[in-house]
Image (cartoon, helix red, strand yellow):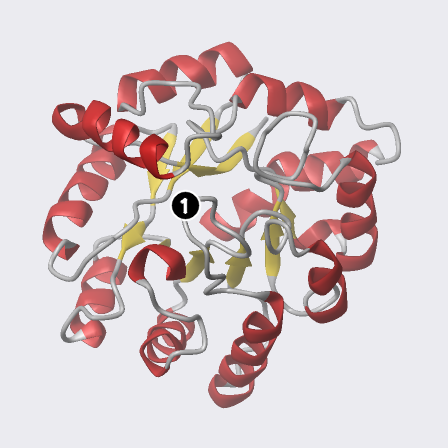
Amino acid sequence: MIIDFHTHIYPDKIAERTINTLMRSAPDVKVYTKGTLNALLESMENAGIDKSVILPVATRKGQFDTINKFALDINNNYKNLVSFGGIHPDDESPEEKLKFLKENGFKGVKIHPDYTGTFIDDERYIKILKLCAELELKVVTHAGVDPAFDVIHCPPQKARYVLDKVLSETGIKKPFIIFAHLGGIYVYEDVKKYLLGTECYIDISCSFSELGSFCDTTENDVVEAIRIHGADKVLFASDSPWNDQKSYVEKFKSIKNLTDKEKDMILYKNAEHILS
């Protein structure tokens, strides 16, 4: 069993345009599928992945209805796909919008501080995170560098401040925030200092420099992070279409310094717990 906890797709009519726009903003980044639903399903079959979590990104205010209708259609029609919802920090009435997602069976939301130009410790994001904690919605956030931007809107220091604040002010005792990309692209030393060992999840997307052009962490770093953070709080993830799912599966399975139990937890058991 394998669950990929970090993938992206776009509606067919805008997928090619969206992919091209994103690649122009980060020309060194490769793309491995066409970014469509069918392309993801083909990639999953080729990689032996049983389920993928799709993470839509609201890049501007007012996209909530369109993005989440597409996501809801996926959830209602594909048993091997789970789409989170998307929300922008400028969206009005976040209480109502997040309640709508909860009532319609969504397991969580994706936020992307860089694409919204909003730091993770902004009061709007803190409000969203608190609401998600209370509604038992998981939150996946991009963390660290994004190759399309010069500013890091979710660095480990700010991530730790927000994590501590939200957990203490809501009284939540279990992790519900997932910091993508091993806690932060290109900031691993600060991830070790501020995030590893805390009550959050991390995913391993964009974590093997051997497989991608926009990260600097290695297999040894991934193993170290798992040892420090705990295998029960790490999720297998690829960031498809920006990384190749099959290569990610093969690379992770080939790691010799992890036990079979640890691999199973990361490949699917932790994700199953979150999605149950």
Q: Is residue 11 at all visible to an observer of this figure?
A: yes
Picture layout, residue 56 above or below residue 111 = above
Q: Which quarter shows the N terminus?
A: top right
Q: Is residue 110 at all visible to an observer of this figure?
A: no
Picture layout, residue 268 above or below residue 113 = above
Q: Quadrant of residue 96?
A: bottom left
Q: Position of residue 69 (x, y in %)?
A: 14, 45
Picture layout, residue 79 above or below residue 66 = above
Q: Quadrant of residue 77?
A: top left
Q: How many marks?
A: 1
Q: Position of residue 140 (x, y in %)?
A: 45, 55
Q: In the displayed image of the protein, which residue is found farthest to the right?
A: 257
Q: Which residue is mark 1?
A: 148
Please tell me which residue lies in front, 161 or 215.
215
Q: Position of residue 138 (x, y in %)?
A: 44, 60
Q: Position of residue 201 (x, y in %)?
A: 60, 57
Say what amino acid the circle numbered 1 marks: Ala
Where disc 1 sits, the SS reads: loop
Picture layout, residue 78 above or below residue 221 = above
Tell me the residue at 45%/57% (across/down). Answer: 141
Tell me the residue at 22%/23% (across/down). Answer: 16
Q: In the displayed image of the protein, which residue is found farthest to the bottom?
A: 169
Q: Is residue 174 left or right of residue 129?
A: right
Q: Is residue 204 left or right of residue 122?
A: right
Tell me the residue at 36%/74% (across/down). Answer: 125
